[in-house]
Image (cartoon, coloured by chain):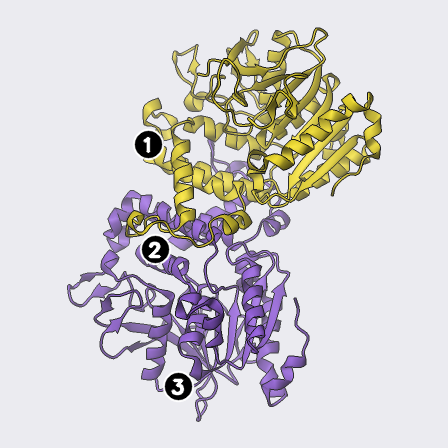
Chain colours: A purple, B yellow
Amino acid sequence: MQQAAKSVKLPGSFNMYRGGQLPEVELVYETWGRLAPDKDNVVLLFTGLSPSAHAASSPQDPSPGWWEYMIGAGKPLDTDRFYIICVNSLGSCFGSTGPASINPCTGRRYALSFPELSIEDIAAAARLALNELGIEHLHTVMGPSLGGMTALAFAVDYPDTIDNLVLISSAANAAPSAIAIRSLQREVIRSDADWVGGDYEVSRGPKEGMRLARKIGLMSYRSAEEWRERFGRERVAPGEVVPPFGVEFQIEAYLDANARKFIGDFDANCYLYLSRSMDWFELAEHAESLEDALARIKARHILVIGVDTDFLFPIYQQREMADTLQDLGRQVEFVAMPSLQGHDAFLSDQARFAHAVQQFLSVDLIDGKVTSISNRSVSR
Amino acid sequence: MQQAAKSVKLPGSFNMYRGGQLPEVELVYETWGRLAPDKDNVVLLFTGLSPSAHAASSPQDPSPGWWEYMIGAGKPLDTDRFYIICVNSLGSCFGSTGPASINPCTGRRYALSFPELSIEDIAAAARLALNELGIEHLHTVMGPSLGGMTALAFAVDYPDTIDNLVLISSAANAAPSAIAIRSLQREVIRSDADWVGGDYEVSRGPKEGMRLARKIGLMSYRSAEEWRERFGRERVAPGEVVPPFGVEFQIEAYLDANARKFIGDFDANCYLYLSRSMDWFELAEHAESLEDALARIKARHILVIGVDTDFLFPIYQQREMADTLQDLGRQVEFVAMPSLQGHDAFLSDQARFAHAVQQFLSVDLIDGKVTSISNRSVSR
């Protein structure tokens, strides 16, 4: 566990969106910056599927975080201005309660006895955690990927508390191609004999399945265009080729190195639960229709970012969401990023994403009131 | 083995492109139509990775072939006009010599002792087979996918014998994203304990690995757009859902059914060898550069078809190839298909593909000489 990580225990038991109950829930989070006296500077940040709450370094934990370029003094999420809270999702394995946690009723790990996890549960647990911390009003709620789905659910379910909403490479539901990829990742993990129906010992999980699932994921996280530019048909050094059928092209070595780095970190059951929650997510279920659900959002100012080369959350999803919100009269900025890095661009294409978030968040500082931004050009 | 399948044994031993030798080679093929007295109506058809030589039904074998809509009386490959020969690739497992065949020197299956297989070997074996059949001159050489790579290698290595060349959803080399996908498919197969380092018994091969590899393949064979239109977020009937983590969305059921259908047919080692041959293929190796290699092609008339939504052989590959051939003074028609079915469109988008091939092959019949086509519009 990171030294900077804090923890909050939710009061009482926790009822899950799809049924079932957790007897107790603990959420781990990290913070940067200072809470203003009138508590009006809170940015709530949800993460993608796999990161921890360690989004950036801090004096308590100087190791770089997963969004290091975005958070800090003078950065888009400016610690001189904002109090940023990043939550480790309910269901994850970096301190928050999830399938890898001990069930206090049995003294054993939940594993598959953990109730079905939804995006809405991640949002609800975060809302309860904020209540415990005495934070009601949120300057901004934001998240990329799964974190964007969570921010969206949060904005629809708790609309009165949010001023600004930032949805990055996310969607109101999962495309069938994304379901296909995630379903296959889960199947590869479950096919590993070391998964043992979910009852593996923590130190002896389905490493091979996780490694292969990660590689499948990388196909959908990056883009063919990026790989063409970055690796082409370059080979690894002849001495590194391991016949037969071993790594031979640099693209293969890249996937291998990335996948091996991943498997140590993530609990397989937590991965399965979080992955499935994305497939299930359907914002339209919150009302009569998707439009009705989006109409519940009260955030005054909304930034929607999509990436041209995103295979997992295709850009039509962000465009449609932005269009609907605009038709509903919300002040929406939609940015179509020409990044080559696909779904992962929010991690890699730092200059573009920093600029977009900085611009968006600087508006009510510069102009005093947010209404002025409706005149700004919207890139489509 | 299909009743319509014929077989030819190549004379002597066969030297492989990357080194090594096969003591004997047998190739299986099927034919449709009649060989003209002056043998000027032969169409040579290479297949994609997984099909057999049974491209279409015939009186001898009335079961539908993999390109049924393309071959027959009055169809684009008109059996009243052409003598069509479809070859089961060297290295495949539907009758032609491959890793699943018995090595006559040992009396045991080759398995991984089969020498490294290249696209060029598939082309060379077919050329030798035609020699045995007394066929020198080819009206048309064609193929989709791996078959297009093979047709290309054939046209460069045996340029004097070909009038027309048809390259469908193919390329002069593999894109890194395609290498990534195939490498992962091979890894999933090899990770299956039932692969046993290639030494499985034929009836007990790595079925689970083959099933998962097929699903990964389907991600690259079809397109996200098609799935969005065809399946959306539709669920299977509630009674068919098998918790936890079983099939729940129709897209998952589709992948599952397709993958299960596939595994009975294909030998895993043959799959590994053919898959790797595509990654290795680099037409530029045949000369000083890709342009020099393409300059060796003497076919008078070339049709290049690409599909907008092809993820495995992205359309820029076909466009670049067509442009280069045109710059070299060849008569090239490039067709950019707007099909939704991705790489597999040549199997599914029957009307468009039939039309394009029919148009192309009708030219020298209608006009008597091929030069007239240079005035026809080229769709880009």
What's the amino acid at mark 3? Answer: Glu
Label 1 secondary element: helix
| Total count of labels | 3
Q: Nearer the viewer, residue A306 or B124?
A: A306
10 Å crowding of disc 2: few (<14), some (14-19), many (20+): many
Residue, x 62% and y 35% (percent of image)?
A: B351
Q: Quadrant location of residue B189?
A: top left
Q: How far is mark 2 from mark 3, CA to CA? A: 32 Å
- Chain assignment, label 2: A
10 Å crowding of disc 3: few (<14), some (14-19), many (20+): some
- The x, y position of residue B104, in whole percent, is 43, 10
Residue B337 visible in the displayed image: yes
What's the amino acid at mark 2? Answer: Leu
Q: Do dots 1 and 2 share one subunit? A: no
**Residue B323 higher or lower than A138, as above or below:** above
Label 1 vs label 2, nearer the camera: 2
- Residue placed under numbered mark 3 in the picture: A136
**Residue A103 higher or lower than B349, as above or below:** below
Label 2 secondary element: helix
User: Going from the N terminus, do you reach mark 2 or mark 3 first?
Assistant: 3
**In the picture, which quadrant includes the C terminus of chain A?**
bottom right
Q: How far is mark 3 from mark 1, CA to CA? A: 57 Å
Label 3 vs label 1, nearer the camera: 3
- Residue placed under numbered mark 1 in the picture: B194
- Chain assignment, label 1: B
**Residue A113 higher or lower than B223, as above or below:** below
- Residue placed under numbered mark 2 in the picture: A272
- The x, y position of residue B200, in whole percent, is 34, 26
**Residue B293 higher or lower than A304, as above or below:** above
- The x, y position of residue B307, in whole percent, is 63, 41
